[in-house]
Every structure is written in structure tokens, then in C-alpha cells.
Amino acid sequence: MKPQRAQDPYDWLHLRDLIVRAFAHMDGRIDPPSSAHHLTPADIADQAVTGEVWVIGAPAVACVFISPLPHALYLGKLAVDPAVQRMGYGRRLIAVAELRAHAFGLPALELWTRIELTENHATFRALGFAQTGTRAHAGFDRPTTLIFTKRLGTAA
């Protein structure tokens, strides 16, 4: 299955449900709870306009939101349906993000993952990301999130 950019008209409700399923393993593990619980189909449709939404499958089994920042291409809501995890879909979406970063003239990818999700940290390191910082959610006096960055070479 080839990654495709999702644009209106699209089944944003299905995509929201995919994200909630993929992030369900975080429930009770992270504090504060995942923002996926507050994500609406309209939010995803907005992301497709203000940034980009990439999916694999019809219906989608994996997705990622991308948004250009001044210093990097931000990856959000990287989600793979639990039934098809470990089949390379996340890796394919990161490869798309690398191509998009080159198209935007950006030297790196950036993503954020919760401190408690150590298995995610290991996965992102294996994909070439390095931890470059921390951040705290509003109201917290401790870091809640790790920032991971992947420096990119020049486009071929």
C-alpha cells in the first residue's frame, strides 16, 4: 500500500477512530491524558488544510500529520492500527515526511512523545531520531514530553 495525502472529501471520522485505537495503549499510562481523546473529525480536516495528513490504506490503517515549523517538519499523530503494527507502515510514513521536509527546504524532522512511553523512544531512536529536548504540558512542573529530532541529509 502506497502512502497518500488525505484531502477533502475524506472519511475524517474513520481517521479519528484509527488514531484513538492506535493511542489506546496510552490510557492510564500518561499524564496528562492524550489529546487524541479531544480530536474531532473537523480538527483533522483542518490539519489537512493548514498542514498535511498522510495515510496508508483505504480505509486507512496508518496516518501521520505533518506541519512545517521554522526549523523542522513536525510529525504529529503518527498512528498505526494495532492490528497491523510492526509491518513497516510507520517507517513508510516517516519516509514520506522526509521527502516533504526536503520539499519544504527543512533540515530535520521533529516529533514529541510522552516520557512514559519508553517503547516509543526506542522505536524512534531505531528510526534515526535523537532526543533533543523536553517540554512540559501546561500546569505541570516537570517534563511530560520528550522532543526527538532526525537530521536529514541533502535531497538526492
Image: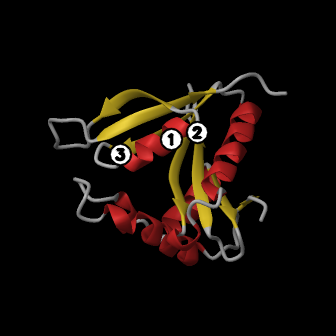
| Disc 3 crowd, CA 10 A, few/some/many (<14, 14-19, 20+) | few
Q: Amino acid under label 3?
A: Thr
Q: Position of residue 144 (x, y in %)?
A: 26, 42
Residue 127 seen anywhere in this rendered image of the structure: yes
* Rendering coords of residue 19 (x, y %): 48, 66
Mark 1 and mark 3 lie on one chain; the one further toward the N terminus is 3
Q: Residue at x 65, y 56 (%)?
A: 88
Q: Quadrant for the C terminus, please.
A: top right
Residue with the mark numbered 1: 124
Residue situated in front as seen by the camera: 138 or 49: 138
Q: Disc 2 vs disc 1: Cβ atoms closer than 8 Å?
A: yes
Q: How is the rendered protein coloured?
A: secondary structure
Residue kind at label 2, given as amino acid type: Leu
Q: CA distance from mark 2 to mark 1?
A: 5 Å
Query: Is 46 above or below relative to 20?
Result: above
The residue identified by callout 2 is: 127
- Real-space Cα separation, disc 1 to disc 3, in angstroms: 10 Å
Describe residue 32's horizontal placement relative to residue 134 as left or right. Answer: left
Query: Is residue 38 visible to the viewer in this orientation of the structure?
Result: no
The residue under label 3 is 118
Instruction: Please name the residue shown 35% across and 59% down the image.
Output: 35
| Disc 2 element | loop
